[in-house]
Image (cartoon, rainbow, N blue to C red):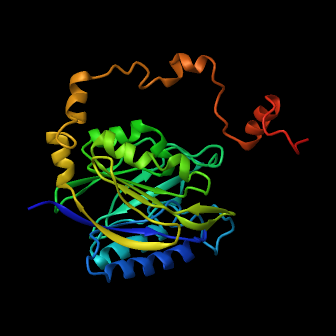
């Protein structure tokens, strides 16, 4: 008998930034998913789908601590339905030793409502997220009842294959990536989910917003790729919630016998053991002798473009 897991996915749309608005929307979407024929055992949501501020507060990006009022509400939802719950990401505010930091954080809850862990975005999208502190920890969590391990990414994290690979090496069989990808990136990014799935012999779920957010538009098209890299499902650009059943033994078979009973990717990795001389010192790599420092602000980006004659029409 296989290890099957029902995962409910919330491709939410037209999200406000307020915690009040999003928590009510999340409650409705979870209620709808749990009323379906195949009730989810794990429910996941989109990047910043929880919110960035309390409407009653003084700032639109003031965030909330973890643990705090936001996570208390989310904990109650997980406990009410008895589900594993990673409802998307939120603006986390941390104040320590007189220093205030903000993280793009995904809280993860157990069926009893306890906080399992928090994934803090490891690769913020600079300079857009210049106010976000990068996370330092890989996060996986176990569906203990079924012996299944989930690996967590957040949006831009998937552009760096080292993150997915390390989660797979930690045993993750399903990689879940909430996102807020704007219109214009679809054609560029549609190959990433199947590529990450294939190279790690894992399911890969990319869960994107579908609608307006902070003056832009997210294109939806959430995607699920199987451990052989084939696309199993792709949504359209409308807000929707749906549940999909995953046969996780497909991952175990691919890793044990080879993808399509041929490619022994993870089994052979330990044999080839490709040397990685810059693994923890990327700045020492020869390529950085000629590459400029990254843009952490829009001002530095504009200065570089102006200096090198890019996008200069209409600029003074």
Q: Position of residue 134 (x, y in %)?
A: 52, 43
Q: Would residue 305 appear left or right of 10 to someone viewing this image?
A: right
Choose top left, top right, bottom left or bottom right for residue 255: top left
Residue 95 visible in this rendered orientation of the protein = no
Q: Residue at x 64, y 61 (%)?
A: 61
Q: Would residue 255 appear left or right of 1 to someone viewing this image?
A: right
Q: Position of residue 244 (x, y in %)?
A: 30, 67
Whether 167 is drawn above or below 145: the answer is above
Q: Residue furthest right?
A: 316
User: In this view of the protein, which residue sits in the foreground, 147 or 194?
Assistant: 194
Q: Residue at x 27, y 76 (%)?
A: 39
Whether 95 is drawn above or below 29: the answer is above
Q: Position of residue 37 (x, y in %)?
A: 26, 81
User: In this view of the protein, which residue sits in the foreground, 89 or 187?
Assistant: 187
Whether 177 is drawn above or below 201: the answer is below
Q: Position of residue 206 (x, y in %)?
A: 42, 56
Q: Residue at x 25, y 29 (%)?
A: 269
Q: Residue at x 16, y 63 (%)?
A: 145
Choose top left, top right, bottom left or bottom right for residue 7: bottom left
Give the total of numbered labels.
0
If the image is split into quadrants, where does the N terminus sit?
A: bottom left
């Amino acid at each position: 008998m296989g290890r099957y897991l029902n995962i409910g996915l919330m491709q939410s749309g037209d999200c406000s930034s307020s915690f009040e608005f999003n928590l009510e929307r999340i409650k409705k979407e979870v209620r709808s998913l749990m009323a379906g024929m195949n009730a989810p055992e794990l429910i996941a949501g989109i990047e910043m789908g929880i919110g960035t501020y309390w409407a009653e507060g003084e700032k639109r990006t003031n965030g909330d601590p973890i643990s705090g009022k936001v996570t208390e509400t989310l904990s109650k939802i997980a406990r009410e339905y008895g589900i594993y719950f990673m409802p998307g990401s939120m603006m986390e505010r941390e104040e320590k030793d007189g220093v205030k930091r903000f993280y793009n954080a995904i809280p993860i809850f157990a069926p009893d409502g306890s906080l399992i862990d928090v994934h803090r975005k490891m690769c913020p999208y600079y300079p857009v997220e210049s106010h976000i502190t990068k996370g330092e920890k890989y996060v996986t969590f176990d569906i203990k009842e079924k012996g299944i391990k989930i690996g967590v990414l957040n949006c831009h994290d998937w552009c760096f294959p080292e993150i997915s690979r390390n989660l797979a090496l930690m045993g993750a069989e399903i990689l879940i990536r909430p996102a807020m990808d704007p219109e214009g990136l679809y054609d560029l990014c549609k190959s990433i989910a199947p590529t990450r799935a294939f190279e790690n012999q894992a399911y890969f779920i990319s869960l994107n917003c579908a609608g307006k957010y902070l003056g832009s538009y997210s294109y939806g098209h959430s995607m699920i790729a199987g451990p052989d890299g084939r696309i199993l499902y792709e949504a359209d650009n409308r807000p929707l919630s749906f549940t999909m059943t995953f046969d996780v033994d497909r991952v175990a078979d691919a890793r044990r016998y080879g993808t399509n009973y041929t490619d022994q990717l993870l089994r052979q990795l330990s044999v080839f053991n490709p040397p990685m001389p810059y693994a923890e010192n990327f700045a020492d790599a020869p390529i950085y002798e000629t590459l400029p420092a990254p843009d952490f602000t829009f001002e530095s980006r504009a200065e570089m473009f102006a200096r090198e004659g890019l996008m200069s029409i209409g600029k003074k």
